[in-house]
Image: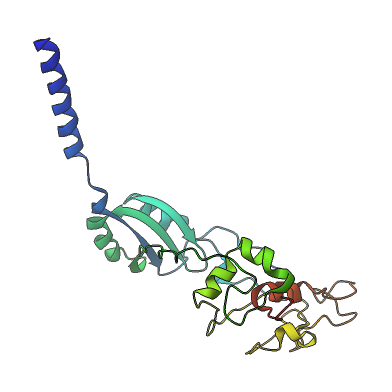
Amino acid sequence: VTHLLWARQRTLALVLIASLSLPSSADTGTVWVFLTDKNGNDGRPIPWTVHADRELADLPVTQQYAAQLESYGSLRTRSRWLNAVSIELPDADAERLGDLPFVAAVSPVRATRRAVPPAHLPARKTAAPHQDYGPSFEQLNLLGVPLLHASGLRGEGVRIAIMDTGFNWPDYRAFAHLNVIAARDFINDDEDVTDQRDQPVTGNELALGQAGHGTRVLGLVAGNDPGQL
């Protein structure tokens, strides 16, 4: 029994010593490494044939640069448009990356904490003051929208860009409250983003129109018609 107890104590001591010798996760971090150029790049840009020329930004990150950076740590992702890679590595090595001739800047990836959700409030068709959801209440309640409204979160001051086709927003009272800052039809090169009859979708196809998909997406994002939506 004494021998068995000693063996258990010895095993526990070995586990503790091994645990103490492991590197702490606090000694590592994740950074974005922004590169100076795309020299020596033999990759292909993303094909883009509709009213657009291929640009340098469409080329992938230079593989030689990524391979050299990977020797410092674990490569997480790469962005051709930022011309940058994200890498997890020891903090001490992160400071050395700026000395590499092809590195323009190094920026830490910030860690954030999720906000504590507000206390649960009973859902009602008028859960938020002066807000009548009408028949849209059930689906909005599934997403927790009434709770957000009751907490005072209604999206005021938020600027949203939607890329789609067929925005017939002037035709519906659910959009009367919107402040549309700018609109542009990049496909047909004009300022009219509505579903124009007989206007092709891509500028070079035979099509009946642009469809009304943009209207429906805008309705999901910002539609407001008391008693209905």
Colouring method of the image: rainbow
Residue drawn at (51%, 60%), measured in percent from left and top? Answer: 41
Residue placed most toward the observer, 91 or 215:
215
Residue 193's place in the image compared with 220, above or below, is below
Expressed as whole percent of the image width and height from the top left, the position of residue 181 reads 62, 90
Quick one: 27 or 12, which is closer to the camera? 12
User: Which quadrant holds residue 129?
Assistant: bottom right
What residue appears at the point 82 percent right and 80 percent down from the top-left corner? 195
Task: Decide if residue 50 is in sight here.
Answer: no
Give the image location of residue 95, x and y in percent.
24, 62
Q: Nearer the viewer, residue 186 or 128?
A: 128
Q: Is residue 81 above or below residue 199?
A: above
Residue located 68% across and 86% down the image: 183
- Would you say residue 111 is visible in this rendering? yes
Horizontally, residue 92 falls left or right of residue 54, namely left
Q: Residue at x 30, y 56 (%)?
A: 29
Horizontal and vertical percent for residue 21? 17, 38
Q: On the rendered image, what quadrant is the C terminus found in?
A: bottom right
Q: Quadrant of the N terminus?
A: top left
